[in-house]
Image: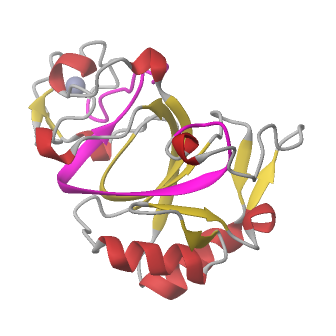
């Protein structure tokens, strides 16, 4: 479980469309450098923004609001400058936050008001029953309208608030070229997921 969502770091999250795809961290690091999204490593699990960062991420109606310069080492993992985090989890996991929109059951169209009980954010994405129609549901089949998502492997751009950036088509094309996978994106504000809690 992710604690203290109020203290979360806003982030754009990229993950393979196939939630079970589990590439190694090394592959993820390589891919996000090969696309130009990320550059030099910043210690374990983090990289600097890359040379094509501003070509691959379109800022909507506003300029970038935080710096590309790292203020100090303590800022790694925070939202105070743009950089990239790599997260690998042992099983498909729902990433969500307190702003996540309520999804609907694809079978009966009822709003799944109980989604947080069915799939606590940060917990492995298991199958659950729709409380209205009893259809078996997995969170990865629901339409979260980019306010949550499910995956095992994530490339995350820290410092980006929900809806302020549109990833360019070129980002998904390049990711597909280097990885052979289809990718999707969503926005959440959360602390780093702790894989030891799985
Ligand atoms: Zn239903």
Q: Is 32 situated above or below 79?
A: below
Q: Which residues are magenta?
A: 78-107
Q: Is residue 92 visible?
A: yes
* Residue 29, position as x, y percentages in the image: 45, 73
- When asked about the image quadrant of residue 175, the answer is bottom right
Q: Residue at x 57, y 78 (%)?
A: 33
- When asked about the image quadrant of residue 23, the answer is bottom left
Question: Disc count in the image?
Answer: 0
- Which of the two residues, 114 or 99, is positioned nearer the viewer here? 99
Q: Residue at x 62, y 63 (%)?
A: 48
Q: Is residue 91 left or right of residue 34?
A: left
Q: Is residue 196 left or right of residue 98?
A: left
Quadrant that contains the N terminus = top left
Q: Is 112 situated above or below 46?
A: above
Q: Residue at x 71, y 50 (%)?
A: 166
* Residue 76, position as x, y percentages in the image: 53, 47
* Residue 117, position as x, y percentages in the image: 18, 17
Whether 53 is among the magenta residues is no
Ligand 1 lies in quarter: top left
Quadrant that contains the C terminus = top left
């Amino acid at each position: 479980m992710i604690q203290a969502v109020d203290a979360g770091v806003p982030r754009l999250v990229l993950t393979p469309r196939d939630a079970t795809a589990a590439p190694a961290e090394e592959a993820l690091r390589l891919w996000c450098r090969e696309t130009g999204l990320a550059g030099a490593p910043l210690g374990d699990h983090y990289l600097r923004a890359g040379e094509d960062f501003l070509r691959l991420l379109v800022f909507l109606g506003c300029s970038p609001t935080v710096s590309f310069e790292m203020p100090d080492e303590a800022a790694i993992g925070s939202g105070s400058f743009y950089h990239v985090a790599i997260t690998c989890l042992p099983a498909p996991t729902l990433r969500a936050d307190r702003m996540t929109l309520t999804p609907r059951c694809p079978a009966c169209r009822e709003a799944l008001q109980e989604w947080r009980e069915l799939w606590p954010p940060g917990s492995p994405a298991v199958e659950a029953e729709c409380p209205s129609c009893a259809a078996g549901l997995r969170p990865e089949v629901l339409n979260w309208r980019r306010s949550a998502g499910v995956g095992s492997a994530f490339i995350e751009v820290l410092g980006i608030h929900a809806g302020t950036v549109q990833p360019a088509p070129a980002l998904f094309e390049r990711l597909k070229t280097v990885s052979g996978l289809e990718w999707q994106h969503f926005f959440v504000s959360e602390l780093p997921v702790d894989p030891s809690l799985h």
